[in-house]
Image (cartoon, rainbow, N blue to C red):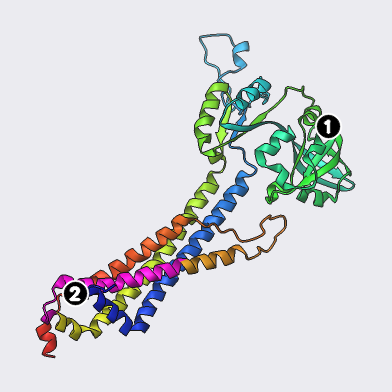
Amino acid sequence: MKLPVNLNIAKTHLLSRKKQSIVAMLGVTFGIAMFILMISFMKGVNKFLEETMLSMTPDIHIFNDYKTDFSQSITKEYLDDTTRLAGVRHPRPKQITLNIKNAPQILDDIRQDDKVIAASPMLSSQVFFNYGPVQINGVINGVDILEEARLYSLKDKVKDGRLENLLTSDNGVIMGVGLAEKLNVHMGDMVALATPTGTSIRLRVVGTYQIGIGAVDNYRSYVNISTVQQLLGKDKNYITDINVKLRDNKLAHDLAIEFQKKYNYKAEDWEITNSSVEASNLVRDVLTYVVSATMLIVAGFGIYNIMNMLISNKLKDIAILKAQGFARKDIIEIFLAQSITIGFFGALSGIFLGFLLSYGLSNVPFPAQGTFSLKYFPVIFEPLHYIFGVLFGITTTLIAGLMPSVKASKIDPVAILRG
């Protein structure tokens, strides 16, 4: 198909200066490729960190919070005189129980909600693990292990043994791999536990798990909830926490408010618990977009300089075209077509190169550090990033080519032809 005159002239200009055209196109290519690589990697990092943190964080945590109401004072029992004002300075908090009353009924009610995947009761305690001469501080969580598995996908994180081993053992414990290594215990070993109040118990290791978070793997263990109740000297209905997993964690905020009003206990959603993670993700996102946009803008300025040089070298051609009757809009169209062509093909090659670089990075093995469970560098492939890269690349080159095109259209052909 025969091209219109203006586009045919633009094609001739591009092909007559192949080196300049290729250099301009490469500027767009590498700018967009680096944009794709950086945003795919940073988004992958954010997703990995969020999934790692949320892997051991419930969507909603229901618990009996400490109260800070010190309005009641024992002075009223001894100074029952309305003519005098009595008060206690800096009173101590009174002894309270932190259990959730009617916990089984609350659990049944929560599990009937269609938005809920799992609701797991929990009772935890600080303990000292003793194995021979080694004594390590840690935490045991008394749980319903099957509900806990649905809550945190624990089956995928088990290293030795099976979660079901806890159900068949009255004195079983599933340890984090870091804690097990510190104690040098293995499957079947007996380990002694002691609470800060002096109560002790002996448990058998029936499994180990690995999350990839040192604060969890090095300190936390799972036992049956009845074991912790026995250790603390509490009855079978004594539960201090209820952890909830939702089908869509974006509903956690509104549902937490609803649960708090309904059950009259403190309910915190995952966004409150992990506010620092959300803030760091936002900072990294902004940094990624700023750096990537800077790369594309620099590429645009490179195209602007090349278009200026191209116009300087084509002044006589422009003068001849205008002398032959070409209007200002024709001159703008000729040089703008060159800029858009460079931007379009540069953008296409840029997203292709960006995909290859991202794919290559996603297959680079991540150097294992301790219990950090990551096999390869985290990279995500989001089509929207590629679409945005093409649009941004074309827009940048369009703006970069517009100003030189307008400048070329204002050239006086008589002055140029006179020399």
Q: Which residue is mark 2?
A: 331
Front-lying residue, 148 or 198 = 148
Q: From which residue to which does the magenta span run?
A: 322-351
Task: Of the two numbered discs 1 and 2 on the same chain, state the one appearing first in sequence.
Answer: 1
Using residue 324 as the reference point, say whether residue 305 is left or right of it: right
**Residue 264 falls inside the magenta stretch:** no
Classify residue 262 by image quadrant.
Answer: top right
- Name the quadrant of the C terminus: bottom left
Residue 329 lies in the magenta stretch: yes
Q: CA distance from mark 1 to mark 2?
A: 90 Å
Whether residue 406 is visible here, answered yes or no, is no
- What is the number of the mark on residue 379? none
Q: Name the residue located 52 percent from the left edge and 15 percent from the top edge.
A: 85
Question: Of residues 54 and 98, which is closer to you in this image?
Answer: 54
Residue at (61, 29) in percent of width and height? 65
* SS assignment for the magenta stretch, majority: helix
Which residue appears farthest toward the bottom when viewing the image?
419
Q: Position of residue 79 (x, y in %)?
A: 59, 11
Along the line of sight, the residue nearer the viewer: 13 or 150 = 13
**Eye-nearest disc, 1 or 2:** 2
The amino acid pointed to by label 1 is Thr
Q: Which residue is mark 1?
A: 199
> Residue drawn at (60%, 18%), measured in percent from left and top?
73
Quadrant of the drawing holding the N terminus: bottom left
Residue 342 at least partly seen: yes
Q: Which quarter of the picture shows residue 97?
A: top right
Task: Count the numbered circles shown.
Answer: 2
Secondary structure found at label 2:
helix
Q: Is residue 289 left or right of residue 57?
A: left
Q: Name above or below for residue 299 compared with residue 270.
A: below
